[in-house]
């Protein structure tokens, strides 16, 4: 496999390699992701290659679904407990037979580099080599050095943030803390994601709110009790090292409701009488409430808007959430964020990291907003935009207005633990190539480009996500 720096001009490529070398061995900071904390808490051997690399990877399963291969054949569990493929080798062969579907995609780039750099397997995957690649990876997974905590150390991860709901009892994080892996300053921390108790359109919203109240020791039958329960759960998360919250709303809309109106809306929701307009208003209002809470407890706010969740309704009905049925939509920010920014955008104690799935907003709205409000930072290209080309377009679109220091550094946002070092490595190569382009155009001195490279890869995310300081 070549050593790409994603630069085609020879002069630029040489400088890019030098800049990449500045960041290549820096520790990995993973301030937002979806790795199951049980993976590291239990530290058990990984299952077979298919269950590790295919079954939970909705980037992979959705591509195969688009070509008529149902998730059942790929081992994705069904909501009704119905039969699915359980033979890991059969699942792997099915991927190999359809490997051509991934030509040119980031999924292929991530997987091939994971095969090589994590497992030391350089054989190209195909129908003919499927069993050879499977067996080579399976043999590695049987070795002690390939258990989760050993790989964590080998990957050079300094901090990894998982993501949990307020209804999680955080027992896995408690175990990690007891083992010296968690807690404030630990290597594995959590992120507070309250979506399941904020989105009143979720079918399990009322049940989740009641569960949160039980864990918090608060009566969530009233709006005041609901807010108190949220504060208590944030305190519990902070006790296990949490430094940020995360909010995955359909839009970026923020709304300033009066306390009386918010309480009335909450009561309607508890009685099953909330409309779609009520649900959107409540989500938007709660972003202001969470900003107020962040001013008190210091949690960084991350906002991930713009995904139409479970757009593929048949897929959701059969397999549930987070299996590849979500679709991006156009997202507005200037007017949507005004109530939040009017109230808190100039507040130096608040940090809001804003992401998008709508890259048309990069230069039109997001970069000027981040360049105009001290509280606002731009998150890395996310999900459908987590690709070499989109990351390059991000730098090209936002640097003019936001510079580098109103961006928050890379986050991998992945469930695929073994892809973490690959994703960070690719992001560092993209940034090296972009910085090199500025150097060859005589727009940035080489020494400043090198300093910026280290900041983007390590110091900025460490400071912005409050992971222990940074320059």
Image (cartoon, grey):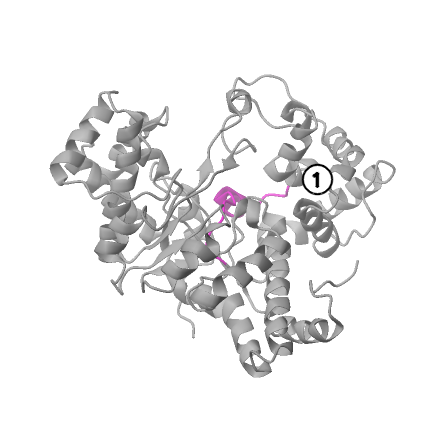
Q: Where residue 241 sits in the image (x, y, percent)? A: 37, 55
Looking at the image, residue 252 lies above or below residue 459: above
Q: Is 40 included in the stretch rendered in magenta?
A: yes
The residue positioned 78% from the left and 40% from the top of the image is 134
- Asked whether the viewer can see residue 24, the reply is no
Using the image as rendered, state which of residue 162 and residue 406 is in the foreground: 406
Q: Residue furthest right?
A: 128
Query: Who is closer to the viewer here, 184 or 62?
Result: 62
Which residue carries the number 1 mark? 49
Residue ID at (47%, 70%)? 459
Number of on-image labels: 1
Magenta residues span: 30-46
Please name whichever residue, 401 or 55, is drawn nearer the observer in this view of the structure. Answer: 401
Vertically, is 299 above or below 428? above
Dot 1: element:
helix
Quadrant, the N terminus = bottom right
Circle 1 Cα neighbour tier, 10 Å, few/some/many (<14 / 14–19 / ≥20): many
- Give the percent coordinates (x, y) of residue 292: 22, 52
55 is higher (above) or lower (below) than 336: above
Q: Position of residue 46 (x, y in %)?
A: 64, 42
Quadrant of the drawing holding the C terminus: bottom left
The answer to which quarter of the image holds residue 44 is top right
Magenta residue check for 371: no
């Amino acid at each position: 496999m070549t050593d790409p720096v994603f630069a085609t001009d020879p002069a630029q490529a040489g400088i890019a390699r030098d800049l990449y070398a500045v960041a290549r061995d820096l520790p990995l900071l993973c301030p937002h992701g979806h790795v199951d904390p049980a993976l590291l808490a239990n530290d058990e051997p990984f299952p077979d290659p298919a269950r590790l690399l295919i079954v939970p990877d909705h980037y992979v399963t959705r591509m195969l679904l688009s070509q008529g291969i149902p998730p059942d054949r790929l081992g994705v569990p069904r909501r009704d407990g119905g039969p699915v493929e359980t033979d890991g080798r059969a699942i792997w062969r099915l991927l190999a037979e359809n490997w051509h579907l991934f030509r040119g995609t980031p999924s292929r780039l991530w997987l091939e580099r994971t095969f090589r750099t994590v497992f030391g397997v350089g054989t190209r995957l195909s129908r003919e080599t499927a069993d050879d690649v499977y067996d080579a990876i399976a043999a590695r997974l049987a070795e002690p050095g390939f258990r989760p905590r050993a790989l964590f150390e080998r990957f050079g991860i300094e901090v990894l943030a998982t993501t949990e709901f307020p209804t999680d009892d955080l027992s896995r994080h408690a175990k990690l803390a007891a083992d010296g892996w968690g807690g404030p300053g630990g290597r594995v921390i959590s992120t507070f994601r309250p979506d399941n108790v904020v989105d009143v359109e979720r079918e399990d919203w009322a049940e989740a709110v009641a569960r949160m109240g039980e864990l918090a020791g608060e009566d969530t039958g009233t709006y005041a009790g609901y807010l108190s329960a949220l504060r208590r759960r944030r305190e519990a998360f902070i006790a296990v090292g949490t430094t940020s919250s995360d909010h995955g709303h359909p839009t970026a809309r923020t709304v300033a409701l009066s306390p009386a109106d918010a309480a009335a809306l909450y009561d309607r929701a508890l009685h099953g009488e909330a409309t779609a307009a009520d649900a959107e208003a409540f989500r938007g209002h709660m972003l202001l409430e969470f900003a107020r809470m962040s001013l008190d407890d210091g949690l960084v706010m991350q906002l991930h808007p713009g995904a139409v969740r479970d757009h593929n309704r048949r897929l959701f009905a059969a397999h549930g959430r987070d299996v590849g049925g979500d679709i991006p939509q156009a997202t507005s920010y200037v007017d949507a964020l005004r109530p939040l920014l009017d109230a808190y955008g100039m507040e130096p104690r608040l940090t809001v990291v804003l992401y998008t799935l709508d890259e048309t907003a990069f230069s039109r709205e997001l970069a000027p907003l981040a360049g105009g409000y001290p509280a606002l930072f731009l998150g890395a290209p996310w999900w459908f935009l987590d690709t070499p080309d989109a990351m390059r377009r991000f730098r090209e679109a936002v640097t003019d207005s936001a510079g580098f220091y109103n961006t928050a550094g890379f986050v991998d946002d992945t469930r695929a633990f073994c892809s973490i070092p690959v994703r960070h490595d690719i992001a560092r190569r993209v940034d090296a190539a972009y910085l090199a382009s500025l150097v060859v155009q005589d727009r940035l001195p080489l020494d400043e480009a090198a300093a910026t490279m280290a900041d983007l890869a390590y110091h900025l995310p460490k400071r912005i996500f409050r992971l222990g300081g940074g320059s």
